[in-house]
């Protein structure tokens, strides 16, 4: 297996912002499909907000006293959603976060999008307040409205293209036998759906059941590890395609990951491993634990196979700073 390169430096930067960081929604429920089949930038076929306001947030990073990045529902590429009465509200998020939300960009195909945008799309943060009169709007309808807003106010022009690229295919290490920490989601489960954290509160780590699986369904998240320096991630009622799509970032694999397990339905999983240190840093000699690939095999019963596969990417052709309100 090739050396572990971070799949784009910006992937790690995004994890510190909102979409993939600790105690945030981690895994995309739909790993390969976008929110709409219409071409990016084709606003005429998309829905739109009835009222929208955009303001650049100059408070700076939250670590330096700036506004805490937040939204009134999870705006990653996952499907978890809380009805808001038609309100979209987000604070101090970079434009790249809104693009990822609008086009349902997963970890596996995120770097091509990032490579196609100017630097300010990652560094300049904006507050967006918008409303639709449809109080029962779905998350994918919100995505289409955001596409229209980006095209109108940011002059976004983009397109989709399919590229044949190196990938890692996740397959069962032993045919027909998932690992001990990967189980079909129980049909009689009554676990609650995820809800977004309060704006000013740090969400607690998900509670687990008596077998160590997360008690909350519909997403995956970081869980308190069993030993210092380890990373423990778990999810409930998620598809294998969703789980596998996250491996690119979790394992710093350097290429997209696709599901080739042939496992249908939804699953609960927990994986714990020792993450590789950031580039340029040496691992502590006092820290031990399984590598990501070892944990995949022993805990989930999966292994990664190098392949070539067609992957769809969203590429930005043009984007401008937004016009004043």
Image (spheres, rainbow, N blue to C red):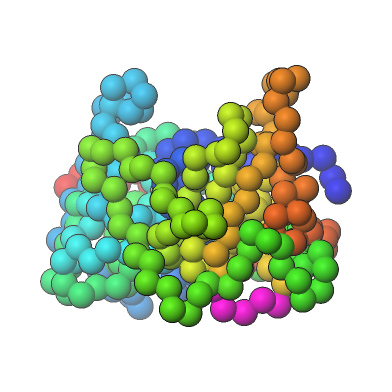
The range drawn in magenta is 262-266
Q: Is residue 109 left or right of residue 305?
A: left
The relative height of residue 310 versus residue 27 in the rendered view (above or below) is: below
Q: Quadrant of residue 35?
A: bottom left
The relative height of residue 127 versus residue 68 in the rendered view (above or below) is: below
Tell which residue pokes out farthest to the right in this image.
1
Q: Is residue 252 left or right of residue 56?
A: right
Q: Quadrant of residue 141?
A: bottom left
Horizontal and vertical percent for residue 192? Answer: 34, 65
| Residue in front for this viewpoint, 139 or 160 | 139
Residue at 30% x, 73% y: name it: 138
Horizontal and vertical percent for residue 139? Answer: 33, 68
Q: Is residue 264 magenta?
A: yes
Q: Is residue 246 magenta?
A: no
Horizontal and vertical percent for residue 79? Answer: 41, 66
Residue at 72% x, 45% y: name it: 292
Q: Main secondary structure of the magenta part?
A: loop
Tell which residue pokes out farthest to the front in this image.
210
Horizontal and vertical percent for residue 261? Answer: 72, 72
The relative height of residue 169 versus residue 225 in the rendered view (above or below) is: below
| Residue in front for this viewpoint, 105 or 41 | 105
């Amino acid at each position: 297996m090739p050396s572990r390169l971070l799949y784009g430096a910006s992937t790690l930067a995004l994890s510190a912002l909102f979409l993939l960081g600790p105690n945030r929604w981690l895994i995309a429920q739909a790993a390969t499909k976008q929110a709409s089949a219409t071409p990016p930038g084709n606003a005429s076929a998309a829905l739109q907000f009835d009222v929208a306001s955009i303001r650049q947030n100059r408070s700076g990073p939250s670590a330096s006293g700036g506004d805490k990045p937040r939204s009134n529902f999870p705006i990653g590429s996952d499907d978890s959603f809380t009805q808001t009465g038609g309100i979209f509200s987000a604070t101090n998020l970079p434009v790249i976060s809104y693009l990822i939300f609008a086009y349902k960009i997963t970890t596996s195909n995120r770097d091509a999008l990032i490579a196609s945008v100017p630097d300010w799309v990652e560094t300049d943060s904006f507050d967006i307040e918008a409303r639709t009169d449809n109080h029962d709007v779905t998350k994918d309808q919100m995505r289409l409205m955001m596409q229209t807003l980006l095209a109108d106010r940011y002059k976004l022009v983009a397109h989709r293209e399919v590229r044949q690229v190196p990938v890692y295919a996740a397959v069962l290490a032993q045919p027909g036998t998932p690992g001990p920490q990967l189980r079909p989601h129980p049909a009689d489960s009554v676990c609650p759906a995820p809800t977004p954290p309060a704006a000013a509160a740090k969400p607690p780590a998900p509670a687990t059941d008596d077998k160590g699986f997360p008690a909350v369904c519909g997403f995956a998240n970081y869980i308190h590890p069993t030993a210092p320096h380890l990373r423990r991630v778990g999810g409930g009622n998620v598809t294998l395609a969703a789980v596998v799509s996250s491996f690119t970032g979790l394992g710093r694999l350097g290429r997209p990951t696709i599901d080739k397990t042939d496992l249908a339905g939804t699953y609960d999983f927990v994986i714990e491993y020792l993450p590789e240190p950031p580039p340029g840093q040496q691992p502590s000699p006092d820290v031990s634990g399984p590598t990501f690939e070892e944990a995949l095999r022993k805990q989930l019963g999966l292994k990664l196979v190098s392949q070539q596969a067609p992957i769809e990417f969203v590429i930005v052709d043009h984007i401008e700073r937004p016009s004043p309100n």
